[in-house]
């Protein structure tokens, strides 16, 4: 675990670590490095999500916009974070917001890394 290249990702959670290990099983070093380069640029750090959720009290919907939930972001913006209840819930569930977004980004990065491996 300590020698894993996934440990270089800032704020990685055990759930994200095990998910990334399972989806990259069978990758050679070149494929893994390509995946990590793409994934690192797309992922959201769960520790940063706390900051985005707190800023959501001043800019409603900010955290939802940053995880590409545009419809919910607009709803939060016009209802002031669903009367701040939704913003408080996001603050409590910030890790799951980041993990769900990171799963989607891992899938996209995985597809891009596989396409790059096919072309070479």
Image (cartoon, rainbow, N blue to C red):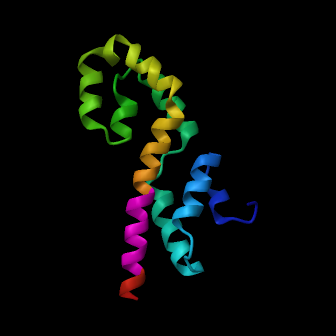
Q: Please state if 113 lies on the left or on the right of 68 as rendered.
A: right
* Secondary structure mostly seen in the magenta stretch: helix
- Measured as percent of width and height from the top left, residue 52 is found at 46, 31
Percent of width and height locating residue 38: 45, 64
Residue at 34% from the left image edge and 18% from the top image edge = 81
Instruction: Say left or right for 55 vs 8.
Output: left
Where is residue 54 drawn, in percent x and y? 49, 23
Identify whether 42 is placed above or below 27: above
Q: Quadrant of residue 116?
A: bottom left
For the view shown, which residue lies furthest in the bottom direction?
A: 120
Quadrant hosting residue 112: bottom left
The residue that appears at 54% across and 68% down in the rendered structure is: 24
Residue projecting furthest to the top? 83
* Magenta residues (range): 106-116
Position of residue 25 measured from the top left corner of the image (x, y, whole percent): 57, 70
Q: Give yes or no for residue 85 being in the magenta stretch.
A: no
Q: Quadrant of residue 33?
A: bottom right
> Relative to 99, is 83 on the left or the right?
left
Picture mark count: 0
Q: Is residue 108 magenta?
A: yes
Quadrant in the picture for the C terminus = bottom left
The N terminus lies in quadrant: bottom right
Query: Foreground residue, 105 or 10?
Result: 105
Is residue 7 shown above or below 64?
A: below
Which residue is at the front of the view, 61 or 15?
15
The residue depicted at 26 percent of the width and 15 percent of the height is 79
Residue appearing at x 57%, y 80% in the figure:
28
């Amino acid at each position: 675990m300590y020698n894993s290249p996934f440990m270089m990702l800032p704020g990685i959670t055990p759930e994200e670590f095990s998910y990334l290990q399972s989806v990259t099983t069978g990758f050679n070093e070149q494929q893994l490095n390509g995946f990590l380069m793409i994934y690192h640029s797309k992922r959201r750090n769960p520790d940063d999500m706390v900051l985005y959720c707190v800023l959501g009290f001043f800019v409603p919907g900010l955290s939802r916009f940053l995880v590409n939930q545009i419809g919910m972001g607009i709803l939060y913006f016009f209802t002031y974070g669903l009367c701040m209840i939704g913003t408080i819930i996001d603050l409590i569930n910030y890790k799951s917001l980041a993990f769900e977004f990171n799963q989607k980004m891992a899938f996209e990065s995985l597809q891009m890394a596989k396409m790059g491996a096919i072309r070479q």
